[in-house]
Every structure is written in C-alpha cells, then in structure tokens.
Amino acid sequence: AQKVTQAQTEISVVEKEDVTLDCVYETRDTTYYLFWYKQPPSGELVFLIRRNSFDEQNEISGRYSWNFQKSTSSFNFTITASQVVDSAVYFCALRSEDSNYQLIWGAGTKLIIKP
Amino acid sequence: ETGVTQSPTHLIKTRGQQVTLRCSSQSGHNTVSWYQQALGQGPQFIFQYYREEENGRGNFPPRFSGLQFPNYSSELNVNALELDDSALYLCASSPGTSGRNEQFFGPGTRLTVL
C-alpha cells in the first residue's frame, strides 16, 4: 500500500528561524518518485522538487533544502532563515508503479511564519 | 508559455444539480489529471486523461466523469451533486504519464454545494 504521512499538522515560527517539515512514506516499489508542493492561500499548488528513489543526494536550492533517506523512508524539507512569504501549506507526495503513477498525497503541514 | 488555466474560479450549486469544470493544459502537455481537495486535506486523485482516453481512476463514483479534447484541454463533470462534493477541484497537466513527470497545477475551481 502507498501512503504518505506528514505528522505535523501546523508549525508556527518567528521569521528568520529555521524550520523542518517532516515526510514519511510507504511503498513496496523499488522505483518511485517523491515530490514537495507548496500551496499558498491563493490555492494553486506550486511544484518545489522531485526526487527519484535512486538519487539519495540531498538537494539545496537557496533557502530550501531536502534530506532524502531511504533507510528511514523519509523526505524532509528544511527552510533556512524563514520569511513571512514562506507561509503556506506544504504537501509531500509519492508516485510509483504500484499506485499506477497516481500522486499519493500527505495531509499537508500548515506553516505560519510570524514577523 | 501559458500555464494551466481553469474555469470558473468559483461556483455555487444546489444538491442534485450537475456541474462542468474546465481545464486548459500547459502548452505541450498531453496528460491531464483531476483532483478533489476538501478543506484542510490533501488532494485526492479523481482520474487522469492521456491523449483523450481515461488512463487511471481514483476511488470516486461514476457520477464523476470527464473528457479530454484533441487540444488536450479537459472537462470534469459531476452529476447529482452532494453536499460532500463541496471542495477545491484542481487540474494538473504533465508532458506524459511517466511517474518522473512533475504535474503543473491550475488555480483550481472552488465548488460549493448548498
């Protein structure tokens, strides 16, 4: 069975703090893809990153970084020096052959950055 | 390059009515997926269309149906609306059905069923 768990329902931090959003996934497939999307209050889902199961290198893009660890089935997302504009709901998602390549989504983490 | 567009932005219907939502895919994308997102939850996959054929379906009843046109735009039709159908309906396009392809989302249609 495919499943994505984002245990943190809501996180609130003060601007400039670092924050990590957790994502744990379950799949029986050996080939799969993990995604992070951002959903600001406007509602549109914005693609942030894709990782395939064969690439465990961590990724850094500006203030954003991702830590993919197959050993713990986790794909965590860290924002360094958070800004008010980072306030949004963040979703982790999984695609694999077992799910007929449908995107399986976590419940999302609402991130609130206070000025 | 034009992104994914959806219409209408908002819609209010009453229980039992029928609704059609529309989506224009991003240029060069032949695959469209539809999702339902209830308030405070993650999106739920409804179905996917690839080259005008349904190419996968989630756990939604047959009163949710769709179409894809030769220009790859798509419609989502919902018959016999129920109160629980109130949600944000998201359309996403991608350049194929491969799992590695990221999906690009439109702004969504907010449907309210009274």
Image: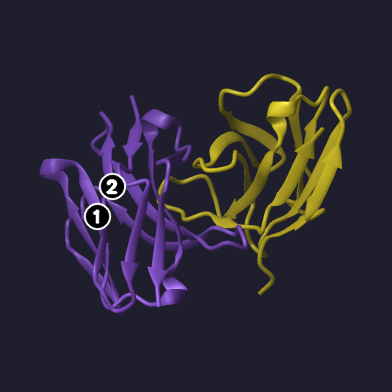
Chain colours: A purple, B yellow
**Most foreground residue, A73 or B42:** B42
| For marks 1 and 2 on the same chain, the one whose residue lies earlier in the sequence | 2
- The reply to whether discs 1 and 2 touch (Cβ–Cβ < 8 Å) is yes
Residue at left offset 60%, top offset 59%: A44
Q: Quadrant of residue A11?
A: bottom left
Q: Classify residue A45 as left or right of residue A59.
A: right
Q: Amino acid at mark 2?
A: Cys
Q: Which residue is mark 1?
A: A76
Q: Classify residue B59 as left or right of residue A86.
A: right
State the image coordinates of residue A4 (x, y, percent, origin top left).
Answer: 34, 38
What is the secondary structure assignment of the residue under circle 1?
strand
Q: Classify residue A11 as left or right of residue B109.
A: left
Q: Which residue is mark 2?
A: A23
Q: Residues within 10 Å of mark 1 (few under 14, many from 20)?
A: some
State the image coordinates of residue B87 (x, y, percent, origin top left).
Answer: 67, 40
**Most foreground residue, B57 or A44:** A44
Residue at left offset 21%, top offset 46%: A74
Q: Amino acid at mark 1?
A: Asn
Q: Quadrant of residue B53?
A: top right
State the image coordinates of residue A101 (x, y, percent, origin top left).
Answer: 45, 38
Report how far apart the C-alphas of labels 1 and 2 lie in the structure.
Answer: 5 Å
Residue B69 badge: none
How many marks the image carries: the answer is: 2
